[in-house]
Structure formats: C-alpha cells, structure tokens
Image (cartoon, coloured by chain):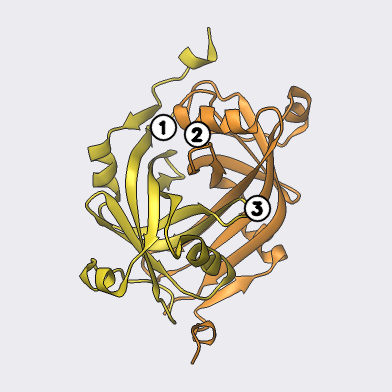
Chain colours: A orange, B yellow
Amino acid sequence: MAPESSEQPALEELDRAECLRLIAPGGVGRVAYDDGEGPAVVPVNYTVDGESVLFRTSVSGRLNRSLLSAVTGGQVRAAFEVDHFDEGSRTGWSVLLRGGAHRLSDDERDKAVRVDPWPGGEREAWFRLAALEISGRRLLGT
Amino acid sequence: MAPESSEQPALEELDRAECLRLIAPGGVGRVAYDDGEGPAVVPVNYTVDGESVLFRTSVSGRLNRSLLSAVTGGQVRAAFEVDHFDEGSRTGWSVLLRGGAHRLSDDERDKAVRVDPWPGGEREAWFRLAALEISGRRLLGT
C-alpha cells in the first residue's frame, strides 16, 4: 500500500465554511512570517472580519518589531494558525489561513472590529491578514 | 513618551533555561516553514531532546508533503512554537525556537526519543529542529 493511501480517517480535512466557523469566536492565534532570517511565529489576539483576521500587537519587543518592519510599507506573505486540542481525548482541530498581511492605517483601524489584546501597555500596530487560502483539519482521536 | 518605553511589565521575556523548562513536557507544538509559496504552520506532536525538538508527521496531506519536500535533501530554516494560555486569567507563555530542520534518517530515528503522534495512520516522516535561537515571553495578566 502506498503511503498516500494509508492515512486513516482519524484526520479529516475541513472545508472553508467549517474553518471560518471554528475560528469565528476569536481569541489567541499565531501569525507566521519571514523576518529575513527565516520563519518566525508570534501568538496574538485576533478577531475575524469576513475572510480576514485582524490582530494587533505591541510596537515593542524584538519579534513584534520585525513583524512591523516586514509588513510596513506594503504587504507580506504570512500565515495565521488557530487550533484547539484536548490532551485527554486527543481530539481537536487546526485552521490555517495563508495570504497577505498589511498594517492598517488609522482610518482602517477605526473602522475595524475592536481587538482586545491581553497584555497591558502600548498596543499600536494593527494588521489584517486577508486569506487567499483557508484550510483545516480535525483530529478525531484514535 | 516613546512607544518603546511604554511597555508595561505585564509581558516579560524568558531566558533560555526557562524556555526549555516550559517546553520539556512535550505535547503539541507548531512548526513554521516556507513551502515556496510563503509561510505555513502545521501543528505536530513533539518531544524535546537537548536544545532540539523532534517531531513527526504523516507523509500524506498537502501541508505535510510540502514540509517533507522542503526539508528532504537538506536543512531548511524553520521555527517551532509552543504556548499555553489561560483564557480566564489572561495569563500564559509562549516559546519560539528558530533554526534548521532536517529529516531524520532511519538510524537517527531509531536513536531518537520516541514521539507518540495522536492521529492514526502512517506517520513516517521524522524531523529534528535544532535551535539556533530560543526566546519566550510570559504574559502576567492585566
């Protein structure tokens, strides 16, 4: 049996509508981008706006500054991942959005759905990742 | 006050030893890599071996195949992220390892710490990400 056909049904692909439904409540997601030294991943608070995710982060902190620097002045390819796993039952799901991220202007920011970031302090950089591709998987347990 | 100095102590940087201590139990982490079409992120089961993380994934599935393809035949820059957040208290931590990932040979695989993957089915591709850089942050709540 070829490896391609040996996957058991414990892992199922999710369609776009189900992916959007799962991430709709917002919360914590992870943005991945390239800062010129390879991939980096930063957890952020997010909210969903159509087929985009909106998130904001501090302008301080090295990784945040590299995200800001990568995105400022244009759009960069980025990925946004949200997941939920239950260690006990070994079930869960993950959703991945891939597309372009750009920093919101003050005007766009004012119109955007409000994101409530957890950490205190200055939280000035807002971003939108518009999904070109949405995929997800559900882990049904073994 | 400049944005750089307005960060409140609610977010603290973690040192390397604390990062390694936090991720030591293993479980679910997220590997970020570039598949030629920008960043992608895949959740995987992992275990820690010194300053490396070992993880394995199916050879099937589009993202897994792109990871396999990116890593096969050499080493690729990758990032590995582990976090734990409590929605109620708005506290938590995240750790990021950045470095090179390579696929383990059968020999290396036999010597490696055993990783117990959750999904059933064929789980043949093993990887090691050796950390060149380890960073982390703890969110103390607001």
x and y, in percent, of residue B51 in the image: 26, 49
Q: Chain of mark 2?
A: A
State whether residue B77 is above or below residue B107.
above
What residue is disc 3 on?
Answer: A98
- Asked if labels 2 and 1 touch by Cβ distance under 8 angstroms, the answer is yes
Would residue A67 appear left or right of B114 to someone viewing this image? right
Q: Amino acid at mark 2?
A: Trp
Q: Element under label 3? A: strand
Q: Which residue type carries mark 1?
A: Gly
Give the residue at x 22% y 39%: B17
- Parent chain of label 1: B
Q: Position of residue A60 (x, y in %)?
A: 49, 23
Q: Which residue is mark 1?
A: B141
- Residue at image coords 32%, 70%: B105
The percent position of residue B69, horizontal first and vertical second, equals 52, 66
The one nearer the camera, A63 or B28, is A63
Q: CA distance from mark 2 to mark 3?
A: 24 Å
